[in-house]
Image (spheres, rainbow, N blue to C red):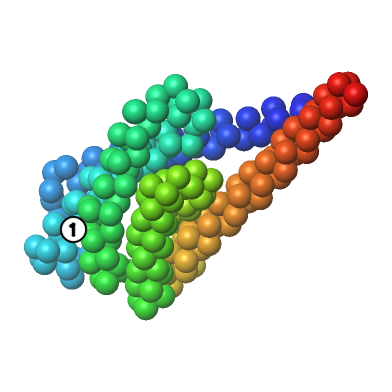
Amino acid sequence: MTKTLRINILKILALFSVLLFSILMLKVISQYTSFEKNVGFLMVKQQVVGNPYWLTFFYIHIFSITLCLLAGLTQFSNRFLAENRKLHKIIGKIYVYSILIINVPACFVLGLFSNGGLIGITGFLLQDILWAYFTIAAVISIKKGKIISHQNYMILSYAVTTTALTFRIIKNLFYNEEYHNYELFYGINVWLALFINLFIAYLVFRKKKSLSAKVKIYKENNEGNEQDHKK
């Protein structure tokens, strides 16, 4: 199996995984369509469900996060970008607006009342700040024509977006109420999910840099060979 084929397989698996977990997230979110205050996550937030502001921001976030996940997912396909430039821009704007106008303000309020004590609160607020920063930086970069910087910041932004998936995966795989303190596990999981996703983004950057260097060397060698032939 060639290295290029392995990379393409990994990309497909990554896209499929995000799509699968986004669909599973929709299933989880569907339970909140009843607007009952004793379902799912709300069962452990009974101390604040009576606060109309917190509850409003919770519903805003929970019903819009899947839109961010799915909209962001389309932005990393070179083929999709090449064949659908206008659609790419439209979906990109949906992704940016849903983060900056809807989710960042909502998550800031939710973060202040996060589970996990001070560990969880600081972790969620840091996620929110990074989410806003990376997304704004991506917008500024593309307006300045810095395509590579735009792509890199979008990868970082999406890494923060998908912490919700990583958080849930870790919780489902490792949390056991008989052995773990819920608040401590929750708080550590917030930081762990962020660290894992940013580390994956770092690996993606290294891979991109490596491929760019190889392409550059290949082009230089070809140009050198062409000049030799002309001589």
- Asked if residue 129 is positioned above or below residue 173 in the image, the reply reads below
Can residue 24 be seen here? The reply is no
Farthest-out residue, front = 231
Instruction: Indicate the secondary structure of the residue bearing disc 1.
Output: helix
Q: Which residue is mark 1?
A: 57
The three-letter code of the residue at mark 1 reads Phe
Q: Residue at x 73, y 38 (%)?
A: 216
Front in this rendered view, residue 162 or 99: 99
Q: What residue is shown at x 38% (from left), y 53% (from top)? A: 140
Look at 23% across and 59% down and name the residue there.
106
Residue at 34%, 28% (x, y): give it: 87
**Given the current orientation, which residue lies at the most extreme bottom position?**
118
Residue 159 in the image: state x and y as whole percent: 47, 51
Question: Could you tell me which quadrant the N terminus lies in?
Answer: top right
Disc 1: CA contacts within 10 A as few (<14), some (14-19) or many (>=20): some
Q: Position of residue 47 (x, y in %)?
A: 18, 70
Q: Position of residue 121 (x, y in %)?
A: 35, 72
Nearer to me, 209 or 49: 209
Q: Is residue 224 visible?
A: yes
The quadrant of the image that shows the C terminus is top right
28 relative position to 224: left or right: left
Q: Based on the displayed image, in which of its 4 quarters is residue 50 positioned?
A: bottom left
Q: Is residue 84 left or right of residue 34?
A: right
Residue 185 image offset from top left, x and y in percent: 45, 68
Q: Is residue 1 above or below residue 167?
A: above
